[in-house]
Amino acid sequence: MSNDKRHTTRKREATIKDVALEAGVSPMTVSRVVNMKGNVKQATAERIQRAIAKVDYRPNIGARRLSGGRTYQILMIFNNPNVTWTAKLLIGMMHACRNIGYHLLIEGVGDYEGDTIGLPIDYEEIAKLLDPSRIDGVILPPPICFDRRLLEIVREKAVPCVRIAGTPTQDIQLRVSIDNFAAAYELANYFISEGHKNLAIIKGPGDYVASALRFEGFSASIRDHGLKISPSNIQTGNFDVQSGNECARELLRLKDRPTAIFASNDEMAAGVLSAAQESRIRVPEELSVAGFDDAPIARSVWPKLTTIRQPLRAMGEKSVELLESYIRQINDESNETVQSNVLLDYELKVRQSSGTCPTAKH
Amino acid sequence: MSNDKRHTTRKREATIKDVALEAGVSPMTVSRVVNMKGNVKQATAERIQRAIAKVDYRPNIGARRLSGGRTYQILMIFNNPNVTWTAKLLIGMMHACRNIGYHLLIEGVGDYEGDTIGLPIDYEEIAKLLDPSRIDGVILPPPICFDRRLLEIVREKAVPCVRIAGTPTQDIQLRVSIDNFAAAYELANYFISEGHKNLAIIKGPGDYVASALRFEGFSASIRDHGLKISPSNIQTGNFDVQSGNECARELLRLKDRPTAIFASNDEMAAGVLSAAQESRIRVPEELSVAGFDDAPIARSVWPKLTTIRQPLRAMGEKSVELLESYIRQINDESNETVQSNVLLDYELKVRQSSGTCPTAKH
DNA sequence: ACTCAAAATGATAACGATAACACGGCACCA
DNA sequence: TGGTGCCGTGTTATCGTTATCATTTTGAGT
């Protein structure tokens, strides 16, 4: 009546023994080939490769971990309320994972209000997720990569960690980002080259380092061109359409109204557009607007937004690759030095929301 | 010089033996408590629970799988180019996984063009992902849940599977969805109640079953009210803004121009709005527009879109819960019958893009 | 008190992979 | 010619958990 379920659960997978039998060697030698440990004769290795293909062998990750090896799993912690942004990173990560034989685990942290994930973070919960029996490393996208307490936990647990965006810290070296400063600098250059002199900026929330850098870069360009940005031309939003709208209202109400507004992300830039529409200010004829990210909204609003394109997918890919090479390094499997700080290329996308300054002399 | 790395890799985790020692029982009894197998005295169980808490024990999933148990990991296959939509499902899944002690693996399939994942699908690759040594089950969101060949693979491998949206099939029973037919029916009712008689619809791509159901529901309501929908009022887009715009141009060019357009998703509805704007047709005064999904774009366009809200997060949660109870059932751990077809509530959101028919008599 | 089934618990042997070590053979040098 | 060392390969033990079966304890019925 009662049947042995243990060995009949679904179809049996090929094990390393099957390969060994097929190739006429010991399992250990097969293991060496699979893990590219070297010290295997070329001819033997090729025979084993053929055997692996023949029996369709794939290593059992559970067994691997159990015997002290890697898990071949990495964790991404998901807590950005801007799901599009995060999802694009994810796509890059999935792609890279596939290429290097890793698997991607994701966990959301925060209070899951509505459809999005917000703060606060349950640190106890996170600490459990960073269990070495489950993962080889972790990737932290913003905003969670700025969280000092979380970084502390990661350091304590000594989990290999790559942060996306963020700034380098002493504890955690690995990082993938774009040069936010340079990007915003270039954007301001563009505005100024179009004759704009009265520029305004809508900053992001204070704890976003990337956003602070955008502000710095934007300001630096203005200074370097011998111009000034008045304090009243600096607003702070929180990355959503609504706050962009409100900040823009403030700016457009100014006596000396700015002719160009840079919002630190596309959502806020969309808010600027709607504020302009409400005030019957034509874009780009009377007001130039630019965002940041090249999010879908940048192309779905009218006029389409001038923006800085972030290579999100590439950032996701790179973060996985970086993490993997670091993991290899600390396992003494490679002698290559791991680059700790990868900067990827951004791109200025000029679209219909910006143009020549109306008061510029030709 | 060379040190034993095996047992010094990061901090040692508590094992079941530690718990057993602490509680003064055998590991087997602890295992029974952890897995709620019963046949343990109340007092013993409580003592063990305390010991588990004290040593901060968490089962090693690798070892579990190795010894024939579950992996406590489920896989979601990610291939929807609409990342927002998919990401919201993900959030629900992550939440549910956390609650029931599962972990979520994700894998992208398709050619990863640009920032999004498109078809075609590499079936060999997928077949490998459905490896029982890695996962207990799989969740398929649209559009991949409509793929007949994939479903065939899932059936062959006998992997527990939940499909989101899609229609029930013989092979794979588990399914989470909203009632697309009823939702579109209700939307048409609303249009008609506002006096509209000349309705138009922009369908989704042919292979989306959900989209076909929306068309059916919309048509049914029209018929049931003694009205008709002319073939020229039926267009087919492919779920993006551009195609919505093109379809709308066709519709707005008609001699007997429709007064209300239902686009099968919000992106296409946004395209309808821009087409109306180009033709200087005022929305909602001269034309009512509605979308489907309540995507972010629905609230970022102007006027904001009337739409059907899909409870994506709840759908994600439910899909995980459903999968887990099914897995329990086939493991003979529970006698409860698993509901195979879960329908969740949608919601009609009336916003500024729709209103009373201009030609309606009061 | 005495049986005997049922409940509670323990002992043992896997699961699949790999670390650590052992070993045979061959090359190279003194 | 006899070490010396490295290369290629095999042997053994082990990781943490659970299935299976063996054993002990409990408790209900006589």
Image: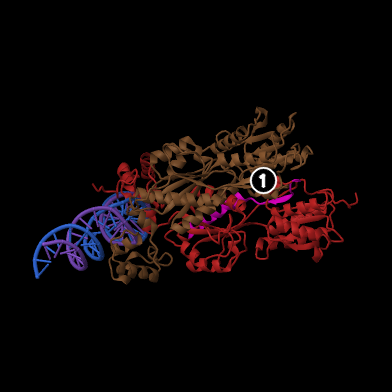
Chain colours: A red, B brown, C blue, D purple
Locate the C terminus of chain B by quadrant: top right
For this rendering, which residue is in front, C13 or A22? Answer: C13
Residue A85, percent from left and from top: 62, 52
Question: Is residue B299 left or right of A116 when viewed as pictured?
Answer: right
For this rendering, which residue is in front, A179 or A277? Answer: A277
**Could you say which quadrant of the image residue A261 lies in?**
bottom right
The residue shown at (32%, 71%) is B22
The residue shown at (28%, 61%) is B39
Amino acid, disc 1: Thr
Is residue A323 one of those drawn in magenta?
yes
For this rendering, which residue is in front, B70 or A50? Answer: B70
Report if residue A281 is visible in the image. yes
Is residue B35 one of those drawn in magenta?
no
Residue B279, percent from left and from top: 78, 37
For the residue carrying disc 1, how many other residues have a C-alpha within 10 Å: few (<14), some (14-19), or many (20+)?
A: many
For this rendering, which residue is in front, A95 or B324? Answer: B324
Question: Magenta stretch?
Answer: A302-329
Residue D14, percent from left and from top: 31, 62
Question: Is residue A173 left or right of B127 when viewed as pictured?
Answer: right
Q: Is the stretch drawn in magenta largely helix, strand or loop? A: helix
Q: Which residue is mark 1?
A: B306
Residue B189, percent from left and from top: 63, 40
Question: Is residue B85 left or right of A102 when viewed as pictured?
Answer: right
Report if residue A106 is visible in the image. no
Locate the N terminus of chain B by quadrant: bottom left
Q: Dot 1: what SS?
A: loop
User: How many discs appear?
Assistant: 1
Give the letter of the chain under mark 1: B
